[in-house]
Image (tube, helix red, strand yellow):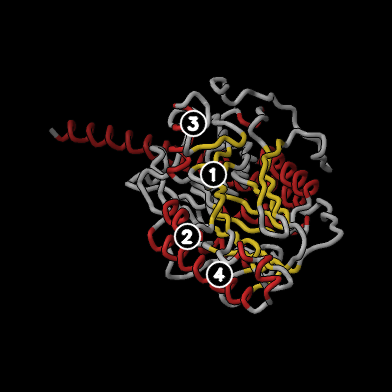
Amino acid sequence: MKKGNDGAVKKQNKHLKRFKKFLSVFISIILIYAVVSTCLTLIGLNANRKKAKSFNAVEYENRPEYKNYDDGCWNIISDGEIKVLQLTDVHIGGGYLSVNKDSMALNAVAAMVTAEKPDLVIVTGDISYPVPYQAGTFNNKSAATLFADLMEALGVYWTACYGNHDTELYSYYSRGELTEVYESDEYPHCLLQAGPEDVDGSGNQVINIVNSDNVITRSLILFDSHSYVDGDYLGILWKYDNIHDNQIAWYKDTVNKLSKQNEETISKLGAEKAEKYKELKTVKSSAFMHIPLTEYRDAWNEYVDNGYNDTQNVKYNYGTVGESGKQIYCGIKDDSLFETMLELKSTDSVFCGHDHLNNFSLTYKGINLNYGMSVDYLAYSGISKLGAQRGCGVLNISQDGTLVSNNQNYYQDKYLSQYAKEQVTMQILNENAK
């Protein structure tokens, strides 16, 4: 009996030694991988940070004045035309797996910004893409600062609204923490502000274009469209959030406040100017967010169901849908933001991103619903080798606040860069469209 027990003990000890050896080897591999990946990330990140800071500053002949007020609004003071450049879904990974693609993204942004010379750049979400199996890191701050370093080198004023990928559940930094980085003295060209504390999200903000008569010719209103809902913590079920009720209340209060301000200003300017500005008593505005409103889906479906022809509600402007499946990956619930826009008669245009292969503009019930063009080289499989979807949105705002927008593809000769562009295939985004 004793010999049997001794044999069992020896066998147990042998298995325990094997397990300890296996565990030791496994831990060693993990530690080696952690050290190597960290070193590679630092090397790649430093190389891209050096590249981001190497771009020449954009040369301007005349620039408007930028003023920040205690109520959280930035004012762009100008009597001339204002150009806004919409970028979306830049998707900088910031890790060792995404070094080359991050470099391409920086190059694309610099080329388009340099050529367009915008008075303001608005990024409609997903600057950062800290998805570890594609980026090689959980650190979303690395990507955020890479982009901010680039914009500071270019010397161009910019702001952003957050997308679902900017702050993943597993990423190191929250929206609030990224906002603190963007608001720091290190990035004086970044106009992003946290927004009201009693409103959900971070970065709900207003930028007004104001002329020398102190009349607001257009307000640019940015929303945090949040991330995933209904237990879809990692976003693998495509359950996206909507604009929240207290954000809609903030929007309504903001529009009413700005309209009242305009009305009071105009009333003091005399009869001639009062007539000139009569259409601005209700402030003109545009909304910016990452995740599209459900009305994008409704408008597109109505247009397609009518054989890709206009309807009573829908007018086609430009672009198409290139996404498969649901095609429009909007919030999964209903919200009343669009209805509130119709009620207030202020917002005449909405700009979003999120769906990288969609670039259409439709006018739905009198409001333009626009997709920007994505920059992404990383998130979609094989997208770095495709080019029809990559570009920017150009928004020209006239002296009276009228806005005209269009999308521009990156692979045009006018978008020159200090570094060579990659070769891509210009695919057809929607073969079913007429």
Q: Distance between the Cα atoms at labels 3 and 4?
A: 34 Å
- Please tell me in which quadrant of the rendered image residue 57 appears: bottom right
From the image, state whether disc 2 or disc 1 is nearer to you: 2
Q: Give the SS element for disc 2.
A: helix
The residue to which callout 1 is attached is 369
* 178 lies left or right of 396: left
- Please tell me in which quadrant of the rendered image residue 199 appears: bottom left
Please give the name of the residue rendered at 62% of the width and 51% of the height, measured from the top-left corner.
123
Residue 239 x %, y %: 38, 42
* 326 lies left or right of 125: left
- Please tell me in which quadrant of the rendered image residue 106 appears: top right
Q: Give the SS element for disc 1.
A: strand
Nearer to us in this view, 272 or 356: 272
Please give the name of the residue rendered at 54% of the width and 31% of the height, measured from the top-left corner.
321
The mark nearer the N terminus, 4 or 2, is: 4
The residue to which callout 2 is attached is 344
Q: Distance between the Cα atoms at labels 2 and 1?
A: 17 Å
